[in-house]
Image: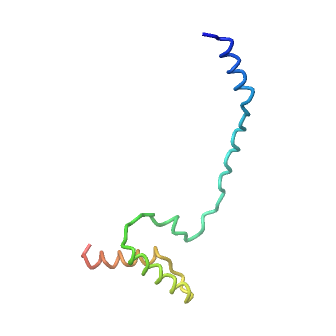
């Protein structure tokens, strides 16, 4: 083996390599908790729903918000689940 040739190739690769600067540390988000925020008091869950159900929910929430109501999809879904659970007797 020609170690001189290997060493020359290695030196050439190292000379050609540009040092990539270390990424800057990410600044922590110093957000204040919003009073009455759902993120502070509610649990986040993911549910699968039929596309038509999602479309109807989005349309309903949009109509309510356009009319000046302070409602979002999580309010509607929470109310629907509570109502269903009451009907089930739990």
The reply, left or right, for residue 11 in relation to residue 81 is right
In what quadrant of the picture does the N terminus appear? top right
Of 19 and 4, nearer the camera is 4
- Residue drawn at point x = 52 percent, y = 65 percent: 39
Q: Is residue 41 above or below residue 18?
A: below
Total marks placed: 0
Q: Is residue 3 above or below residue 76?
A: above
- Residue drawn at point x = 68 percent, y = 21 percent: 9
The reply, left or right, for residue 77 in relation to residue 31 is left
Residue 31 rendering spot, x and y as whole percentages: 64, 60
In what quadrant of the picture does the C terminus appear? bottom left
Task: Identify the colour scheme used.
Answer: rainbow
- Residue drawn at point x = 50 percent, y = 77 percent: 72
Q: Is residue 78 above or below residue 4?
A: below
- Residue drawn at point x = 56 percent, y = 87 percent: 66
In which quarter of the view is residue 70 placed? bottom right
Residue 51 rendering spot, x and y as whole percentages: 39, 74
Of 16 and 43, nearer the camera is 16
Residue 88 rendering spot, x and y as whole percentages: 25, 76
In which quarter of the view is residue 46 placed? bottom left
Residue 78 rendering spot, x and y as whole percentages: 41, 74
Residue farthest to the left, as pictured: 89
Of 2 and 86, nearer the camera is 2
């Amino acid at each position: 083996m020609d170690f001189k040739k290997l060493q020359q190739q290695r030196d050439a690769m190292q000379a050609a390599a540009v040092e990539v600067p270390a990424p800057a540390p990410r600044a922590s988000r110093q957000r204040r908790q919003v009073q009455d925020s759902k993120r502070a008091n509610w649990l986040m869950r993911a549910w699968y729903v039929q596309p038509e159900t999602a479309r109807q929910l989005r349309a309903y929430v949009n109509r309510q918000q356009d009319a000046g109501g302070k409602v979002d999809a999580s309010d509607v879904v929470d109310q629907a689940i509570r109502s269903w659970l009451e009907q089930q007797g739990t």
